[in-house]
Image (cartoon, coloured by chain):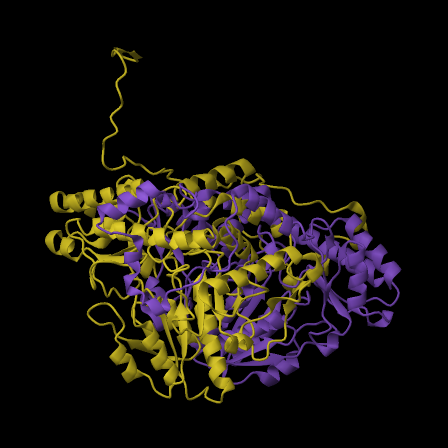
Amino acid sequence: MKTSEGTIGKMKRIPRDHKVRRFHQAKWDEPVIFELSQPGERGVEVPRVEQEIVASVGDGVSQLPDSLRRKKRPNLPQISQFRVIRHYSRLSQEVLGADFNVEIGQGTCTMKYSPKINERFARSPKMAELHPLQDESTVQGMLEITYKLDLFLREVSGMDKFSFQPGSGTQALLTQASIVRKYHESRGEGELRNEFLTTHFSHPSQAATAAVKGFKIIYVPADENGYPDLEALKGLVSERTAAFAVANPEDTGIYNSRIKEFTDVVHAAGGLCCYDQANANGLLGITRALEAGFDMCFFNLHKTFSIPHACGGPATGAIGVTEKLEEFLPGPLVDFDGERYYYKRELKNSIGKVRSFYGVPPAVLRAYAWIRALGAEGLEEAAKIACLNNNYLYHKILQIRGASAPYIKGRRLEQVRYSWQKLTEDTGVTTYDVQRRMADFAHHYWTSHHPYIVPEPFTLEPTESYSKAELDEYIAALTHISQEAYENPEIVQTAPHNSTGHRVIESVLDDPEQWAITWRAYLKKTAKE
Amino acid sequence: MSAKPFAHPYIPNSAPAVKEQMLKEIGLGSIEEIFADIPQELRLKEKMNIPPALTEYELERHVNQLMNKNITTKEYISFLGAGCWPHFIPAVCDEINSRAEFLTAYAGEPYEDKGRFQALFEYQSLVAELVDMDVVNVPTFDWAQAASTALRMAARITKRTELLLPKNIHPDKLLIIRNYTSPDLTLTLVDFTEDTGAIDLADLQAKLGPNTAAVYFENPSFLGSLETNGQLIADLAHAAGALCVVGVDPSSLGVMEAPANYGADIVCGDLQPLGVHMHYGGGQSGFIATHDDPTFVMEYPSRLFGIAPTEVEGEYGFGDVAYDRTSFAKREKGKESVGTQTALWGITAGVYLATMGPDGMEELGQGIMQRSQYAAKQLASLPGVELKFSGPFFKEFVIDFSQTGKTVKEINAALLSRGIFGGVDLTAHDPQLEQCALFCVTEVHSKEEIDALVTALASIV
């Protein structure tokens, strides 16, 4: 064999026994788009106006009164098309998505496989080029898919009707709070029932959206096992209780076995029970919202139902309600008369709308396709394997020095909230340090919502989409970093080393004199005196 | 799964051998043990009534068969607008927003996801040039949500509770704003003038009071008409101690003045016209913009990405500005709420603006005005057909068919049979708009298509 320096003999098997990936992310040191501007360059030409139109109406803009005429051209950059492509393609290489890394560290986000076939459907002109106000006769395919997805989610949840209008889990939470308010108002108890109960492990948007709807937020504390405290709940409900909203399992991965006792207590007090099913991935075909006593629930189609996360939307929070709450749903709703699919627009006590038109139809289309690719058995298998993967991970992570998982021992459902508390006490290395060092191995994890009830947290959710070998890779990386924390903490504390860049100096981001949310603000604030 | 000895393609560890090995390694006899905490009475006993799995080929045939029942705006000529508009989308936009990195990323840190932060910072910066303001948010759901939040921001800043909105606002937008601003804020509608569709200043003056937090108007309005009294409205609002909130269509800002330059304190609008397909209403995306005043910045519920130095000289870094104001940090004590919204459309809008440049945006706006004026002129020449409002308009205009003796419903049905989606029927929206329709004409409409509409209508009315 020859190398550039001479011969080395017969090729040997290349050793691949290193435990952690020798990764380096693309590091382009790319300028900001404005720095690419070259006067005279054009990215694309705009459709040309026919001469006859110009002859007929002139320059068009003369119709604008002087006060509305643009005086100063927008200071947009001038860049040729190919260079725009290179710039954004480079930026994309500085992003890790679930298509690239073992994305099991984003607890509660359910980073499962978004099948490529569904992207083909979503990008087809038969989806992308529809206008929402077209005659119903011209969108029967879309309406049928919407209606059928409604039926499927009724099967999953036991609820009686779904709306796909909310554009996210947060917007579904707002919808739930709006329905709660409208429901009590319709019964003459709108002013009386202004207390909204939830738990500290709930998504911040739970309390935040209820607060937007004017509710006073009351927290049901957790007991030492991580369950919401039933006795505390009994003491907190009254004739002022509007609703109790909770996820089950909560973000800790702990399933509250007594959930039906909770919903019974709230119902006895006249309140509604709202189910945040962001954490539904371990429950499909196993247990439903209905039997647990919930009056409404929602699913994140971009979590449990495989819609890609798209850097943070567009997405959908599909909200389902029992029959008695149907009249409050935001409209319109899709219905079927045996022959044609149509919009039902007259909803007696509707909260109105939360989002324009019908929501995000490409999300509905992808979710429908995903369910059809799995069937009832496949949904149940997905839930079971998601739980198996999680418990496998849980078992192995607890063997890592410095890692622990508070509350009940033995098992979780589909995710776990862990703690590096021991690691931090022993070494000074924090969860943020470990998080940054993970980037050097093409990994990521999410810590927790605030406030950090679990100290030095990290929350992992493997879903059903990753192979055992990939779970092992992730475990090996965490194990390696734990070892580094004990033996060589500085390499962890000064991470990342193999990423797109180095530690950001974040103090400028909180100082009004220094923060720069746009390039123009940055230029102004950093101009030489 | 029961019938097959191999894993479903989406569920690798359902392969029997691996499943067994994993159970063994963690000392579980079966997966059923994991569900021990779920009481038997809550366990689902019957199988879900969902059809059995389709293979990928079967799935493709099935879904295509369903979606082929749809007729699209590329097959029929469409003049539908009203909040979702047809525009020319440069191929680079779909190229970038279909890249798997952007498509499958979510909430990573500014290290492994630096490109996401930079792409959104650049979108914020590019829209900032259109609106001539220094702060733009990571986008929310749509224009209606952006307006709702802008109005709540105004209420918090002024510590007042009354909001004034134009009567000719899109009825659905009003429903969204009403739900979002209740129960604590009140909405009062301000009349529009009969002839121009713009805000009735006398009515506005009468309704402004010491409890007015904000005056909201749109430019163009839902009916396409342009508000030429923007500065006057802003001055009246400010004199009453209220803020001026203006909603815009960003595709107009290559030729139209930025509202910040006629008194707007908070600007909002929809990004969909900037490189996003209509997606049957799924392309909406709402931006909010303000000046770089901490009083305003601290009221945004959204994420705001900022640029920062790193430990290495000469390196750009990015991160969240004033994160502590958000519900992520403070739950119900944060500003409203934030979460997943429409980030990919924000990135797309940035790509679009970088591609179009200042010349492209100017030519876009001009071309839209020329084509829509041509269409309005040709339609108004038909017997019994009238342009409802005098005064300048952008992209959309109202046609009054009431003198033709035909309803808009009948006319649109006849147009449909000729392969044309006519203007949105406004009859149900307001008694002043009976048998009126809202026509949308953009840079995608050729003279041939506009003439086809006119010819069809000539034979119908």
Looking at the picture, how far across and down is residue A290, in whole percent? 43, 71
Residue A247 visible in the displayed image: no
Q: Residue at x 33, y 72 (%)?
A: A259
Image quadrant occupied by the C terminus of chain B:
bottom right
Left/right placement of residue B395 relative to residue A476 reads right
Residue B320 visible in the displayed image: yes
Looking at the picture, how far across and down is residue A264, in whole percent? 36, 79
Number of labels in the image equals: 0
Left/right placement of residue B91 relative to residue A266 reads right
Q: Nearer the viewer, residue B1 or A520?
A: B1
Looking at the picture, how far across and down is residue B288, in whole percent? 49, 63
Q: Nearer the viewer, residue A187 or B72?
A: A187
Q: Residue at x 35, y 51 (%)?
A: A385
Drawing shade for chain B = purple
Left/right placement of residue A477 relative to residue B54 reads left
Left/right placement of residue A245 relative to residue B22 reads right
User: Which image quadrant for residue A481?
Assistant: top left
A330 in relation to A340, above or below? below
A173 in relation to B271, above or below? below
Drawing shade for chain A = yellow
Looking at the picture, how far across and down is residue A252, in whole percent? 28, 62
Q: Nearer the viewer, residue B100 or B153?
A: B100
Q: Nearer the viewer, residue A345 or B439?
A: A345
User: Which image quadrant for residue A357?
Assistant: bottom right
